[in-house]
């Protein structure tokens, strides 16, 4: 009898965790027991720390409420696998400090998975490799996410210092409306009060965001879609330097190198490919070409300034330092 009541309580908890409102009669029908038994099982869940709200009367019923602490969760097979996979890749997110927390949570969940589910999760993890950047220049702090998420929700003005792409810093006073993710980067869509226009800000370039305390009336994001607005804003970003390269290998051989560069494949042949690359800085273009050259020979078609920069880079690499000559 004890096993039956425990199993029934777990089934009842699973129903309540959908967070819908359940009339007592419907719960009794789902569990195949009397309403009195349902009420007794609900009291047992309350004793275990699950906050169950109740409404009396003809249309009364029960709902699982948010409590002061996190009680144990009941997950079905698909939910457990989804959470495990999500935590694994959250450990590689661009949010500083979340990696260790995600791995701790993942270890707890995987330790409880039955063998059949642990094999499914393990098969996926072993079949997928993640390419990490050698320099994480777009890592953001969880505090920034918290500040802007709350400001978007509460319609509160925020001030911060913003590092522009040209290296200059400026003070901003904005009305945050929406956070948008694009790969490993996070963007804030906000109305800039000083410039009287909509702006897109990269969160990794924001320093010391501070809620002001004053509130604003939300505006409609241009086009009605914050993600689309960010996509259009990124596409309009001015690139000061464009280059055309002939890479003497199939594009598939250098695709991994180019995935971090703003590029366009103009021609792809069996023996070579023609690629256009763009950047805000000539030095960054030269470093991109140098990285490609580690895989295959590269010919710079244009501009001449880039070819000159690469020649200077090669000369510096060939010229031994005074310390090397003394060795």
Image (cartoon, grey):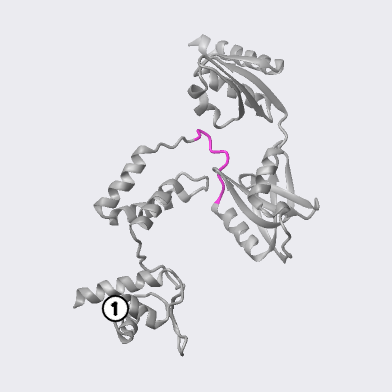
Please indicate whether residue 185 sits to the left or right of residue 53 in the image. Answer: right
The answer to whether residue 129 is above or below residue 142 is above
* Residue sitting farthest toward the left: 1
The quadrant of the image that shows the N terminus is bottom left
- Quickly name the residue at label 1: 32
| Residue 93: x %, y % from top left | 49, 45
Residue drawn 33% across and 85% down? 35
What segment is highlighted magenta in the picture? 133-141
The answer to whether residue 290 is above or below residue 209 is above
Whether residue 134 appears in magenta in the rendering, the answer is yes
| Residue 59: x %, y % from top left | 47, 86
Residue 248 in sight from this viewpoint: yes
Please indicate whether residue 320 sits to the left or right of residue 71 in the image. Answer: right
| Residue 235: x %, y % from top left | 68, 38
Residue drawn 65% across and 48% down? 228
The answer to whether residue 42 is above or below residue 246 is below
Whether residue 275 appears in magenta in the rendering, the answer is no
Query: Front-most of 141 and 115?
Result: 115
């Amino acid at each position: 009898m004890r096993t039956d009541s425990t199993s029934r309580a777990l089934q009842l908890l699973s129903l309540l965790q959908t967070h819908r409102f359940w009339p007592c009669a419907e719960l009794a029908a789902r569990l195949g027991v009397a309403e009195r038994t349902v009420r007794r099982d609900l009291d047992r869940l309350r004793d275990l720390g699950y906050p169950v709200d109740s409404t009396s009367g003809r249309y009364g019923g029960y709902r699982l409420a948010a409590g002061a602490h996190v009680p144990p969760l009941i997950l079905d097979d698909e939910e457990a696998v989804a959470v495990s996979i999500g935590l694994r890749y959250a450990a590689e997110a661009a949010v500083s400090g979340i990696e260790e927390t995600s791995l701790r949570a993942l270890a707890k969940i995987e330790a409880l998975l039955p063998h059949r589910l642990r094999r499914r999760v393990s098969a996926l993890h072993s079949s997928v490799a993640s390419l990490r950047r050698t320099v994480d220049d777009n890592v953001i702090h969880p505090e920034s996410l918290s500040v802007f998420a709350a400001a978007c929700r509460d319609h509160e003005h925020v001030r911060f210092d913003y590092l522009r792409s040209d290296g200059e810093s400026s003070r901003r006073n904005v009305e945050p409306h929406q956070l948008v993710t694009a790969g490993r980067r996070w963007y804030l869509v906000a109305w800039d009060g000083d410039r009287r226009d909509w702006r897109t800000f990269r969160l990794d370039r924001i320093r010391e965001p501070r809620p002001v305390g004053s509130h604003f009336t939300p505006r409609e994001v241009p086009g009605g879609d914050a993600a689309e607005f960010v996509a259009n804003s990124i596409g309009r970003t001015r690139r000061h330097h464009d280059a055309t390269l002939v890479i003497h290998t199939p594009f598939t051989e250098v695709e991994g190198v180019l995935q971090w560069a703003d590029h366009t494949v103009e021609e792809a042949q069996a023996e070579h490919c023609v690629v256009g690359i763009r950047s805000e800085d000539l030095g960054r273009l030269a470093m991109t070409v140098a990285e490609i050259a580690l895989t295959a020979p590269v010919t710079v078609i244009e501009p001449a300034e880039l070819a000159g920069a690469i020649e200077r880079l090669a000369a510096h690499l060939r010229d031994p330092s005074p310390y090397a000559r003394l060795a």
